[in-house]
Amino acid sequence: MKRITLALNWKLYLNELQSIEFVERLNHSKDQFDNIDLEIYPSATAIRSVKNVLNNSSIKIGLQDFSIFENGAHTGSLSLSSIEVDSCIIGHSERRDFYKENDNLILKKLRISNDKKINTILCVGETLKEKEEGISKEKIKSQLSILKNLDIQIPLTIAYEPIWSIGTGSVPSNEYISDMLSTIKSELKALYSHEKNSAIKLFYGGSVDETNISNLSDISLLDGFLIGSAGSKFEKLINMVNSLV
Ligand code: 13P
């Protein structure tokens, strides 16, 4: 059976002390995570503490976002050189929406993570309006088109996160997700060799929790999940892991 990855995007849910407490509980329940791969994206200010406390080296730690500026006079920014991480998220819809990040900027970030050989999760997804207008696939294709300008050299994951599903409890049917993942696959096929393509993983994100993860894991094209709210609550994480075995 395929190993599922749970990537926990902690957003701004847990501060440094809460992150440490979460990781201490993870350390005590290490055995429960034998059958899945875990990635954690804490607040940047908690990354050092999380790395220090975590005693499970198979868990990857990453940045939720980073600046295109490497160093210098950029008040309030942090870059992929600010702290050593295994992976990063680029193009999350909350960055695209609240911080007006466009595809041009997202491509610049992808170039940086590619140059630095950092595993990358690229997020794509349509709004409710785009879904209602029947242009979801066009939206995804246009977001993926930036990859044309990049010779990808890193473990890349595409996370399909319909914006209308993030934090709403509204989860698409497995058929809908499969259809969108197939579209992503065929776009990637047109861009990269078979070898590169088979290394690219596909995640789903949007209101994943212990009530739906088992059913969602039936989607054959899925390699894992990018989880927000439910992944920041330890009991919910344990319930999700248990419902996958
Ligand atoms: P929720 O799981 O809270 O809906 O968030 C999903 C998400 O945005 C993960 O990146």
Image (tube, rainbow, N blue to C red):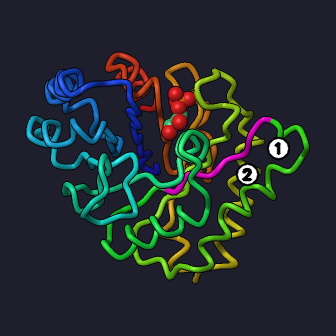
Q: Is mark 1 within 8 Å of ligand 1?
A: no
Residue 193, position in %: x, y? 58, 83
Kindly report which numbered mark, 1 or 2, lies closer to the viewer in this rendering. 1
In the current view of this chain or complex, which residue is farthest to the right?
133
Q: Residue at x 32, y 51 (%)?
A: 77
* Residue 219 found in image quarter: top right
Would the CB of label 2 be found within 8 Å of ligand 1? Answer: no
Name the spot of residue 209 as percent of width and height, x first: 51, 24
Q: How many marks?
A: 2
| Side of 214 relative to 180 (left or right) | left
Q: Is residue 208 visible?
A: no
Mark 1 and mark 2: span between their CA atoms? 13 Å
Rendered position, 98 above or below 135 = above
Q: Nearer the viewer, residue 194 or 110?
A: 110
> In the rendered structure, which amino acid carries the disc numbered 1?
Glu
Q: Which residues are magenta?
A: 122-128
Residue 161 versus residue 199 in the image, above or below: above
**Reading the chain from its start, which is encountered first: label 1 or label 2?**
1
Image height check: is 209 above or below 193? above
Tag 1: Cα neighbours inside 10 Å, few (<14), some, or many (≥20)? some
Between residue 113 and residue 119, name the one nearer to us.
Answer: 113
For image coordinates 49% across by 59% down, the residue present is 157
Location of mark 2 (residue): 180
Q: Is residue 101 visible?
A: yes
Residue pictured at 51% horizontal, 77% vertical: 196
Location of mark 1 (residue): 130
User: For residue 163, which quarter of the picture?
Assistant: top right
Judged from the image, the secondary structure of the residue bearing numbered disc 1 is: helix
| Residue 64 magenta-highlighted | no
